[in-house]
Image (cartoon, grey):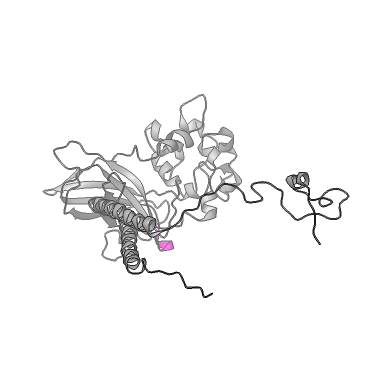
Amino acid sequence: MAVNYNAKEEADGHPSGVGVPGGAGKSRKPDNTAFKQQRLPAWQPILTAGTVLPAFFIIGLIFIPIGIGIFVTSNNIREYEIDYTGTDSSSPCNKCLNVSWNSTPPCTCTINFTLDQPFETNVFMYYGLSNFYQNHRRYVKSRDDSQLNGDNNSLLHPSKECEPYSMSENKPIAPCGAIANSMFNDTLELFRIDNETRTPITLNKKGIAWWTDKNVKFRNPSGNTNNLTALFQGTTKPVNWPKPVYMLDSETDNNGFINEDFIVWMRTAALPTFRKLYRLIERKNNLQPTLQAGKYSLDITYNYPVHSFDGRKRMILSTISWMGGKNPFLGIAYITVGSICFFLGVVLLVIHHKYGNRNTSADIPN
């Protein structure tokens, strides 16, 4: 049985007697709009040999040189790494392996090493940790950003997210939370050895944190005095810290919540093996490299225990380039993608040359 529609009803999207009050039934027909009737303008590319083959070759010819450039740049970055965990019985730091938080006196060890090649540009000193899961959900949330931003109310009343590291000895902890409580606190000192004479290398502790973290996200509490001891009055140090937050540094602009070592630690890592910037070694002049080839020694004040969770600790010396630190993966990825595209282009070109001109239309019998 046919159903008649008038023009006005069809334009409104409702047939006669359907979908309107008093009608026979509700219509399942979509409204007569360009979107619901799929009449929107669209563009669909037509993939032909003339478009696909040049695309594959162009991608290959662009990606392969870029990948080679990135890979060569990455390989030109100087990097030297020392594992000072002390698990090996022959390691100078083996005596410190079972150190605990706040050990008194602190355990110290010295590792001698040799740089075969000079480090020409500015050198970045990192500490590295392995098997340390800073990306655990409860660990990441265990902080009070309002407290770290200098809010006086949050200073004395930490967030519940910090529990069980929000109160200690009936006093609020500043800074609260598991992240702050587990802050890395080894001390690393570098010396150059010339004719048995040890010359200390200047390590800059400022300029290692992000500008936005230092100047926006982290602030000390406000008050009528610049004395941090008074501003933090009524709070206590984190459980695993040897001293309170207002004694992290002797310089006012690098003390309290704005201490750069503390700020760097509070930016959690995404993977269980990571490195964080510890110090900067700046090049003094263009006539000499920042670190000459030769003998060096690393003095370590071993405070941070990692043996209990099978972790490892490293010190890394590295230069950087326009693309950052050493990362060969990016160059390898570009070269791989470019090579695959170029190879597919050659294969498809051969197939097109061999079979493209053949008449594929079938004869249809009468």
Relative depth, front residue between 333 and 41: 41
Q: Residue furthest right?
A: 22
Q: Residue at x 37, y 32 (%)?
A: 251
Magenta stretch secondary structure, dominant:
loop
Q: Single out the residue that lies furthest toward the left.
A: 195
Instruction: Say above or below: 307 vs 244.
Output: below
**Image position, residue 8 (x, y; %):** 77, 44
Name the spot of residue 306 as percent of width and height, x first.
40, 58
The answer to whether 285 appears left or right of 264 in the picture is left
Q: Give residue 112's quadrant in the image.
A: bottom left
Q: In which quarter of the view is residue 213 placed?
A: top left
**Image quadrant where one finds the C terminus:** bottom right
Residue 350, position as x, y percentages in the image: 31, 67
The quarter of the rendered structure image containing the N terminus is bottom right
59 over 89 or under it: above or below = above
Q: Residue at x 27, y 62 (%)?
A: 91
Hey, which residue is sitting farthest bottom in the picture?
A: 365
Q: Residue at coordinates 27% horizontally, 55% vertically from top-left? A: 81
Residue 152's place in the image compared with 10, above or below, is: above
Residue 60: quadrant of the picture: bottom left
- Taking depth in this image into account, of 43 and 121 the one nearest to the observer is 43
Membership of 193 in magenta stretch: no
Say whether residue 108 is visible: no
Which residue appears farthest toward the top when viewing the image? 224
Residue 204 appears left or right of 287 = right
Tell me where the magenta segment starts and ends, as one range. 303-311
Along the viewing direction, whichever of 341 and 92 lies nearer the viewer: 341
Q: Position of residue 218 (x, y in %)?
A: 47, 36
Give above or below for 160 relative to 255: below
Foreground of the two, 339 or 143? 339
